[in-house]
Amino acid sequence: MTKYRYPPKTLAGDYLRASGGFAITGGPALFLPTATPVTVILGTLAVLFGIFGLRTALRQFTVIEMSDEAITVVGAGGKRLAWCDVRQLRLDYYSTRRDSQGGWMQMKVSGPDLHIRVDSTLDGFAGLAGEAAAHAAAHGVAMNETTRGNFQALGVAPPVTEAGW
């Protein structure tokens, strides 16, 4: 069994954004005299930044376990998806620039009623993606053209499935 974690170093930026956004929006909403609509808007934004901070903390303590039988999310909202139940494997790239130089990848493993999403900030993401692709291919899960191209860009060449890779 292989275990993967989100390293605190990669989450530091998210913690900074969450705390900065919470301070900038929550501070004035609580401590400055503002009109009611402004207070509602700032308060709503503060709650959103707070939720983002909590989600970041949950990610820090989440462990992704990969075995021959299943992919498992250990932590808050834990999930387990057996490879024999996987119906779809997607690897998407989200660019932050027009020249496609900056961005991140997100892998989504889907079963009949369960999805597991993992993004490329995870320590060892390429290895996890390679393992997931091999397990999915061994169970006949076909992958779309975009996913195949993204695996190739990541340097992962999963085996050919009977369903056609």
Image (cartoon, rainbow, N blue to C red):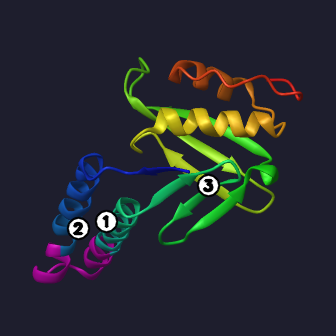
27 and 127: which is toward the camera:
127
The amino acid marked with disc number 3 is Ile
Mark 2 and mark 1 residues within 8 Å of each other at the beta carbon: yes
Q: Count every numbered label the image shows and give the total.
A: 3
- Label 2: state its secondary structure: helix
Q: Is residue 95 magenta?
A: no
Horizontal side of residue 121 vs 18, given as left or right: right
Query: Which residue is tagged 2?
Result: 22
45 and 152: which is toward the camera:
152
Query: Which residue is tagged 3?
Result: 116
Mark 1 and mark 3 residues within 8 Å of each other at the beta carbon: no
* Residue displayed at 36% across by 68% down: 48
Near mark 3 (Cα within 10 A), the count class, few <14, some 14-19 or many ≥20, is: some
Mark 3 and mark 2 residues within 8 Å of each other at the beta carbon: no
On the image, the x and y values in percent for residue 38 come to: 26, 73
Near mark 2 (Cα within 10 A), the count class, few <14, some 14-19 or many ≥20, is: many
Horizontal side of residue 161 vs 49, given as left or right: right
The amino acid marked with disc number 2 is Phe
Q: Is residue 42 magenta?
A: yes
